[in-house]
Image (cartoon, rainbow, N blue to C red):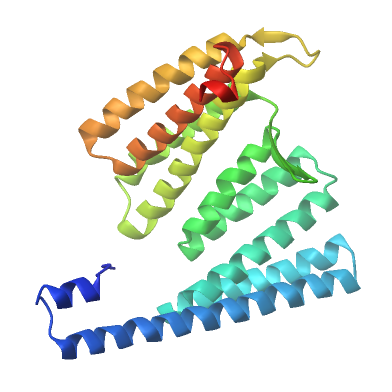
Amino acid sequence: MKVLLDLDDLLDKGKITPAQHVEFSGFAQKATGSLAFNILIGFGVISVSCGAVALVPEASTAIVIGFLAFGGGLILGRESPDQWRLLANVCILVGALMAGGGIVVVGDGSLLSKLIVTAVFVAASIFAESMLLAVLATLALSACIGAATAYSKASYFLIVQEPALTVIIFTLLGIGLYHYSKRLTPEYEKIAIASSRTSVFMVNLGFWVGSLWGNRSDGGAVNIPESVFSFLWAAAIIVTAIWAWKANRRWALNTVATFGGIHFYTQWFEHLGGTPGTV
């Protein structure tokens, strides 16, 4: 169990002695030094991996190096003490992204290649007991139905090609994983919860995009209008907020409050005639 303490405040209130203050401060300093060392080595891993791919710019190179870094991170995470946990996570993340990207490139971006990456991430998250991989697996699943991000000069883009399908799939996944997590041991419960929470984000992103452009058929025609998404999103936020309040689920309450603000802000400017001057 991790506890965050304000040592100066405890010392001022007489809860700890000056000797204890010095002792506990030493623990914190040691942890900070370990964190800095992990970050430094992590950047080294990223640099070496990217350099190797740059020297041999092939998808197969990315896959091999990715799996090596990925495997090293898994071993480090399972066998090493907690002080190396950050480095293990860096290796896992870099390796997973490189290997996954290489597989998708080899598969020419096909649905099968994305499903393979998703399955690999799911299996690895269970084996490594990694919440990070569970989150990546959930995001990889979203890519299977057209979700993506993009960047252009000073601009970031969120792409959800199938808002309705995104909302349906990740609503079912999020609720299912939440209830299933209650049957799992603590080690695997946190993995299911991490994926469930990521699903909550995907549901809200699906609603957000749908409330702006609706859901369109392959021919480009709108088959579910924006107003439907706006209404259902508001209803989902209210229902979830009430449940989170009664069930004492702080994370869920904070999340729906955040997306509730985003929803109001979006609809205010899109449909209610809001302008910067009215803010």
Q: Residue 246 is drawn in which quadrant?
A: top left
Left or right of residue 227, residue 146 in this image: right
**Does residue 38 show up?**
yes
Q: Residue at x 36, y 52 (%)?
A: 189
Q: Residue 103 is drawn in which quadrant?
A: bottom right
Quadrant including the N terminus: bottom left
Q: Residue at x 43, y 80 (%)?
A: 32
Left or right of residue 61, residue 222 in this image: left
Residue 222: x %, y % from top left: 70, 9
Left or right of residue 39, residue 60 in this image: right
Q: Nearer the viewer, residue 167 or 107?
A: 167
**Does residue 165 show up?**
no
Residue 78: x %, y % from top left: 47, 74
Q: Residue at x 59, y 69 (%)?
A: 90
Left or right of residue 106, residue 31 in this image: left
Q: Looking at the picture, does residue 106 appear above or below residue 203?
A: below
Work out which residue is located at the far left of the displayed protein and give it: 14
Residue 3: x %, y % from top left: 26, 67
Residue 258: x %, y % from top left: 43, 35
Q: Looking at the picture, does residue 7 appear above or below residue 105?
A: below
Number of on-image labels: 0
Work out which residue is located at the far front of the displayed protein and give it: 277
Q: Looking at the picture, does residue 45 appear above or below residue 164?
A: below
Q: Residue 108 is drawn in which quadrant?
A: top right
Q: Residue at x 63, y 48 (%)?
A: 118
